[in-house]
Amino acid sequence: DRLASKYFGESVGFLTLLFLITNHLVYRSFSHLQTEGVFNFFLLIGCFYILKYFHNKNSYFLLIGSIFFSISSLMRINGVVLFPVELILIIGFFTYQKFSLSQKNKYFIKRISSSKISKKFIAISFIFLFVPWSAFFAFYFSFNDHYFGDPFTNQRIVQNVESDVATI
């Protein structure tokens, strides 16, 4: 509630609080420590740090946000979709910063102006984006290779093989 109020205003903070109070599924999944609750917890912390990165332009917030996104992907594998989403957000952020529209004089003629973003800042940001995800993918593929003999296997393939063996 306080974070939503601080960053998005009083009405969004109130709606967030109202949603969390009235939604029984949120309470139940967090109280029983199911994977959805833990996944959502790390996902929200990652979103918070990504928003802080957009606000402060400090690359360490991007690193912390990417770490929490990759930890959430360890809880539930469908969190892998956060990697391309995060990549698109960062590319969009830099594109917006580079080619932001500004107003010229009082006639509101819009022109493209270049922003002062150094190449070093962009390089550090992308390194901080890729390091946690590289560690996640290295762990995920090595785990699958060690236990299942194939780094690109998934739970559905393993379950189909087990059900085929059980029917024989």
Image (spheres, rainbow, N blue to C red):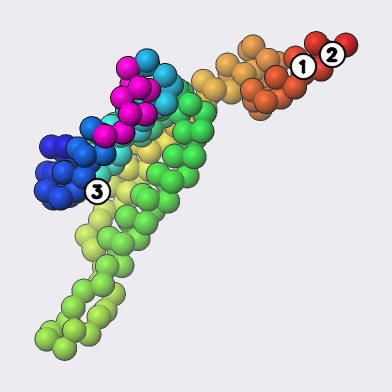
Kind of residue at disc 3: Phe
Quarter-of-image position of residue 15: top left
Above or below, 119 relative to 37: below
- Gap in angstroms between the C-alphas marked 1 and 3: 48 Å
Q: Do the CB atoms of the residues marked 3 and 2 lie less than 8 Å apart? A: no
Which residue lies under the disc numbered 2? 167
Residue found 16% across the figure and 43% down from its top:
14
Which residue lies under the disc numbered 3? 54
Kind of residue at disc 1: Ser
For the record, the magenta segment spans: 22-31
- Gap in angstroms between the C-alphas marked 3 and 2: 54 Å
Residue found 32% across the figure and 55% down from its top:
93
Mark 1 or 3, which is nearer the eye?
1
How packed mark 3 is, by other alpha carbons closer than 10 Å (few <14, some 14-19, many 20 or more), is some
Q: How many marks?
A: 3
How packed mark 1 is, by other alpha carbons closer than 10 Å (few <14, some 14-19, many 20 or more), is few
Where does the image place residue 69, in percent across and percent down from the top left? Answer: 38, 32
Q: Quadrant of the C terminus?
A: top right
Q: Do the CB atoms of the residues marked 1 and 3 lie less than 8 Å apart? A: no
Disc 2 element: helix
Disc 1 element: helix
Q: Quadrant of the N terminus?
A: top left
Viewer-proximal residue among 21 and 149: 21
Viewer-proximal residue among 123 and 97: 97
Which residue lies under the disc numbered 1? 163
Viewer-proximal residue among 161 and 37: 37
Considering only order in the chain, which callout, 2 or 3, is on the residue closer to the N terminus? 3
Residue 59 visible somewhere in the drawing: no
Position of residue 33 in the picture relative to residue 135 (left or right): left
